[in-house]
């Protein structure tokens, strides 16, 4: 045991005061005369014994009172073996505070982040004034790389706000150790603190984290109770291609992370700040449920949309932002040779959303192909050289290829298809002797996702179907859109890089096929075109992605795009490569919502919707007991349970690592002896 003020022990000389009082009893004795004292002798002997015992006990109580009172003022303590580590000012104290949106949850009337901030402010006061701190948040900002003093820690905590991104604890540990190594090396025993709610979905698998034995680790879970919450899991359109003033359906999936059932939740759909539809949803505990909105849009272009609902106590994910692009222009290039039928041109010329250009294969700038959404190889006999390369580039960017074979496919065309690796192709000679039935197409399968929204009602099994004479044949996997009645493939869809390729088995020339003259031909072509535009279009992003990829037609030529919201403008790190713009989400953008992307000439290039990551919405946390179990074998790891310590871990931290203060116990004992003296005097 040691003392904070050992010099105060000189006050123990005050023990002489009660001794002197008992030795020199200055009370006057009054004599009383009795005629006969024989009866009092026995009483006198007995009274003297108890009086001496009482005086001795009172003396003892007074001596003990003075003794423990002096000890209380001297402030005794038992030092912790860890104390020398905290007194070492050459080491570094690394503090991590989780400021992700899950820390918005409440404990009582206080947010998790506010509670963590208060605890950390108290913690820095425990260390010597010369101690150097490293304060780390989820932003991993540049200023967090350098050691700071306690006053700077308090200043930064006072302005700390929520971050739209989260970090796994493995990332946090790596960052802390790298900065510690850079600042003080690996020879010091440093103190590493984690203040977090230890959310399971964002912290990562803690069993895989390997903590070194050099440093001391202190884990302070802010809260461990599971919190009920609802979130938007996903949204999708019944028809991905949105046309102005045309009815569409938006589907939504809601996930319930609570043990409670929810009934009649009101979901609202807003388009350009105007509520256009509502939906009701009931969902059972720990499950998911779907709902849908019917809507139409006015005009073409980007539409800023959001879905809202009410859910407490977690509210940061009660809104989901997304962007719809109505009636976007779809660029189609129709590559032809001599005497090629004009069916493709006629189909796409009837709608303003399609921009179709016909080019002779021998007279085209291949750069035009790279910027197209759909390229139709309309009875092209040879595919080789630069054309093969530019078609591959097109699919890498998300474009689509429609291959309509010539009457006699060249070997180079078949080789091109086989090189793609999607199936095994071969050319055959058209057989017109097998009878019409062998060349008639079967009724399409309406359950095929490709035909979603194409048919208003199920087609009749006896409906008339086109006739086509095969010149290409293939086998293997793929999405076979149309087949012959004998099971052979007529029109198949294959995914290729980010794009698609559609292969037809027969030419469109009337002597080989009447497919182009059937009503089915138009919706199939329209669906191919619309999918080519919506295939790689994202309606929303989240902050955790960091990089946004957008297709941009204009080459900025060393000029910068900027992101705008209201009066705020941001110039993000960006890279433009072959029609694709890569943007890094600026650190200054922290709120979910809609953001405008502006061209260098200050015109609108696109709109971007940013949301918080879904993992933040899963309100399930590691409890102190779980953390203790995970790190049970590591003696340099301490877990503190705030709930069992009334949301204050400082006292327990000091007792474990600095010293156990005894002055309170000494004071209590001193008071106990005063009370004992009173009782002895009163009842003895």
Image: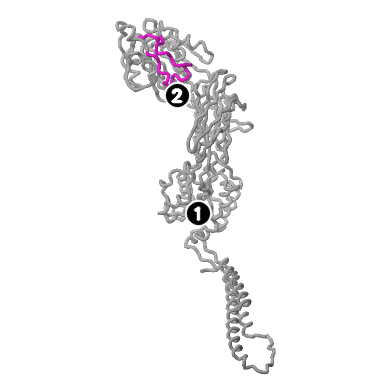
| Badge 1 or badge 2: first in the primary sequence | 2
Whether residue 235 is in magenta: the answer is no
The numbered disc on residue 397 is 2
Camera-side mark, 1 or 2: 1
User: Could you say where residue 487 lies in the image, as x and y percent from the top left?
Assistant: 33, 16
Residue 445, visible in the rendered structure: yes
Instruction: Tell whether position 465 is magenta.
Output: yes
Q: Residue at x 50, y 17 (%)?
A: 330
Q: Which mark is residue 154?
A: none
Q: Is residue 485 left or right of residue 618?
A: left
Residue 485 lies, in percent from the top left, at 34, 13
Q: Is residue 660 above or below residue 152?
A: below
Secondary structure type for disc 1: loop
Q: Are marks 1 and 2 in contact (CB under 8 Å)?
A: no
Horizontal and vertical percent for residue 651? Answer: 55, 58
Is residue 234 shown to the viewer in this render?
no
Q: Residues within 10 Å of mark 2 (few under 14, many from 20)?
A: many
- Magenta stretch secondary structure, dominant: loop
* Labels in figure, total: 2
Would residue 21 appear left or right of 214 to someone viewing this image? right
Residue of label 1? 640
Placement of 225 over or under 317, stated as above or below: below
Look at the image and give the residue range highlighted in magenta.
442-468
Query: Which residue is farthest bottom?
Result: 35
Out of 141 and 302, give the one closest to the viewer. 302
Q: Residue at 63% x, 31% y: name it.
A: 566
In-front residue for pair 493/410: 493
**Residue 316's quadrant in the figure?**
top right
Left or right: residue 36 compared with residue 365? right
Q: Nearer the viewer, residue 231 or 195?
A: 231
């Amino acid at each position: 045991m040691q003392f904070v003020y050992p010099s105060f022990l000189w006050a123990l000389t005050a023990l002489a005061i009660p001794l002197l009082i008992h030795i020199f009893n200055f009370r006057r004795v009054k004599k009383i005369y009795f005629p006969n004292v024989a009866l009092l002798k026995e009483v006198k002997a007995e009274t003297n014994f108890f009086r001496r015992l009482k005086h001795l006990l009172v003396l003892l109580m007074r001596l003990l009172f003075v003794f423990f009172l002096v000890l209380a003022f001297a402030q005794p303590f038992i030092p912790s073996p860890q104390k020398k580590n905290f007194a070492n000012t050459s080491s570094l104290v690394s503090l991590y505070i989780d400021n992700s949106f899950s820390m918005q949850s409440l404990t009582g009337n206080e947010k998790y982040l506010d509670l963590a901030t208060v605890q950390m402010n108290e913690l820095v006061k425990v260390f010597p004034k010369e101690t150097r701190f490293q304060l780390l948040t989820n932003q991993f900002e540049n200023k967090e790389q350098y050691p700071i003093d306690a006053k700077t820690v308090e200043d930064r905590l006072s302005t700390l706000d929520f971050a739209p991104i989260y970090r796994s604890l493995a990332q946090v540990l790596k960052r802390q150790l790298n900065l510690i190594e850079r600042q003080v090396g690996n020879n010091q025993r440093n103190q590493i603190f984690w203040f977090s709610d230890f959310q399971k979905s964002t912290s990562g698998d803690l069993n895989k984290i390997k903590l070194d034995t050099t440093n001391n680790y202190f884990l302070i879970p802010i809260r461990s109770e599971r919190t009920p919450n609802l979130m938007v899991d996903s949204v999708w359109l019944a028809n991905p291609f949105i046309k102005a003033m045309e009815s569409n359906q938006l589907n939504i999936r809601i996930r319930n992370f609570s043990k409670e059932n929810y009934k009649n939740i009101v979901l609202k759909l807003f388009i350009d700040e105007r509520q256009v539809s509502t939906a009701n949803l009931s969902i059972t505990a720990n499950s998911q449920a779907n709902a849908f909105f019917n809507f139409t849009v006015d005009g073409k272009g980007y539409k800023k949309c959001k879905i809202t609902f009410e859910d407490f106590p977690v509210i940061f994910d009660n809104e989901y932002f997304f962007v719809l692009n109505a009636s976007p222009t779809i660029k189609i290039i129709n590559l032809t040779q001599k005497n090629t039928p004009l069916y493709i041109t006629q189909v796409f010329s009837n709608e303003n959303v399609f921009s179709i250009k016909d080019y002779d294969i021998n007279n085209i700038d291949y750069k035009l192909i790279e910027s197209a959404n759909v390229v139709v190889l309309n009875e092209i006999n040879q595919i080789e050289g630069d054309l093969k390369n530019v078609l591959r580039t097109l699919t890498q960017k998300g474009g689509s290829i429609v291959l309509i074979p010539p009457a006699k496919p060249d070997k180079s065309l078949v080789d091109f298809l086989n090189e793609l690796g999607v199936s095994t192709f071969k050319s055959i000679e058209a057989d017109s002797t097998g009878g019409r039935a062998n060349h008639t197409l079967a009724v399409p399968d309406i359950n095929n996702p490709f035909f979603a929204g194409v048919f208003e009602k199920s087609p009749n099994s006896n409906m008339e179907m086109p006739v086509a004479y095969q010149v290409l044949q293939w086998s293997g996997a793929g999405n076979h859109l149309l087949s012959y009645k004998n099971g052979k493939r007529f029109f198949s869809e294959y995914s290729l890089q980010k794009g698609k390729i559609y292969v037809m088995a027969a030419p469109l020339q009337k002597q080989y096929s009447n497919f182009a003259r059937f009503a089915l031909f138009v919706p199939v072509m329209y669906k191919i075109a619309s999918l080519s535009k919506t295939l790689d279009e994202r309606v929303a992003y989240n902050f955790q992605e960091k990089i946004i990829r957008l297709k941009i037609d204009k080459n900025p030529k060393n000029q910068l795009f900027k992101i705008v919201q209201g009066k705020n403008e941001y110039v993000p790190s960006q890279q433009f490569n072959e029609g694709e713009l890569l943007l890094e989400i600026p650190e200054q953008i922290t709120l979910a919502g809609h953001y405008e992307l502006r061209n260098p000439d200050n015109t609108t290039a696109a709109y971007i919707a940013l949301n918080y990551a879904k993992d933040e919405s899963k309100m399930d946390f590691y409890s102190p007991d779980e953390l203790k179990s995970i790190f049970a074998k590591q003696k340099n790891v301490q877990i503190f349970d705030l709930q069992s310590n009334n949301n204050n871990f400082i006292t327990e931290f000091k007792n474990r690592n600095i010293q156990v203060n005894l002055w309170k116990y000494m004071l209590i004992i001193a008071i106990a002896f005063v009370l004992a003296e009173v009782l002895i005097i009163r009842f003895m």
